[in-house]
Image (spheres, grey):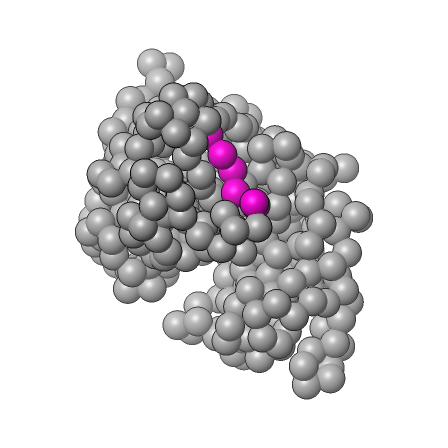
Amino acid sequence: MEIKQYKGLDAIVLENDLLCVSFLPGYGCKMASLIKKDTGREFLFQSALDRLTPPPYGASFSEYDSSGFDEVFPSIDACPYPDGGYKGVPIPDHGEVWALPWQHVVHPNGNGLTAWVKSPHLPYQFSRDLTLKGNEIIFHYMVENLADEPFEFIWTPHCLLNCSTDTQLLVPENLTEIITVEHGTKTLGPWGTRHRYPHTMSVAGRPVDLSKTMPESDNSCEKFYFTQKNTRGWCAIKHNDNGDTLTYRYDADKVPYLAVWKTQGGYRGDYNLAMEPCTGEWDDLYVAHKVRRTAVCEAKERYEWIFKMIVNQEPV
């Protein structure tokens, strides 16, 4: 473990013979970089910025750096908290924790990092203990409910990945239908439109393979959820140019939903892909509460789950 500078900020760097991973505790403890050392492949999307500025609490996500892996909690879209004694408390865009500095402790052996953050307005503490082990980054998440009533939330890893037209999305075979939740899409139609997966037709009548990435010149962006739960607890991308894969494995009972974000030149000119396992649906905690598709941490209890990022392990 080393403490270095990354685009002007202090970074904790975990490294072994296979991987080099960088985290920014002062910037929501985001994972800024994930490099496969033998080929030098950077899995995480990098913006053109030379220096990063940590956002203030409540910032709009689109006004700050869109790169790397930000923790999104307790909602993706800005919305009021939906119920109980905290009903109406505003949750900012992409949640609270991405725009807060975290406390942290490096593991004594230097192969991991424990970090945590407490909400300034809602009754929870969010913590993440991670270990770098061989080709795996193993995350143990925990939400502690500090209130005398249930606490509802949506969590997702907003992990923007480098991609190309050789990049392919891999998901379990039972995931065969999607619903779009992106209002500005020119390919899949308005919010709520359903399509077969992976092969469908765009609103303009052209064939689309949703498991593939379009070129940056497509000037599109898409966000969709699979309508079936991901009971297998994995998803992956494969770079078919050289066979490199990045697989996510996680507790399917705790994280049952799967969303995908693709920006193919249509959002700020960026070009990236995100696989987003979620504890709730539709991006908006208020809406998800109405249809009972949130995660619930009971009063004074803890909600825990495991999430792994694995380099070059074919999913099964």
In the image, residue 63 sits, relative to residue 7, either above or below, namely: below
Tell me if residue 57 comes above or below residue 221 in the rendering: above
Q: Among all residues in the image, which is located at the extreme front? A: 84
- Number of marks drawn: 0
Q: Give the quadrant of the C terminus.
A: top right
Using the rendered image of the protein, determine whether residue 103 is visible from the camera's viewpoint. yes
Q: In the figure, residue 5 lies in which quadrant? A: top left
* Magenta stretch, residue numbers: 292-297
Q: Is residue 115 visible?
A: no
Extreme residue in the top direction: 108
- Residue 88, horizontal then vertical, whole percent: 31, 50
Quarter of the picture holding the N terminus: top left
Left or right side of 168 for 128: left
Relative depth, front residue between 61 and 271:
61
Q: Specify whether 66 is left or right of 166.
A: left
> Going 55% across and 64% down the picture, which residue do you hit?
181
Residue 159 vs residue 120: left or right?
right
Closer-to-camera residue (180/113): 180
Residue 71, image quadrant: top left
Residue found at x 74% / y 59%: 177
Residue 4 location, quadrant: top left
Q: Position of residue 202 (x, y in %)?
A: 69, 78
Residue 165: percent from left, percent from top: 63, 66
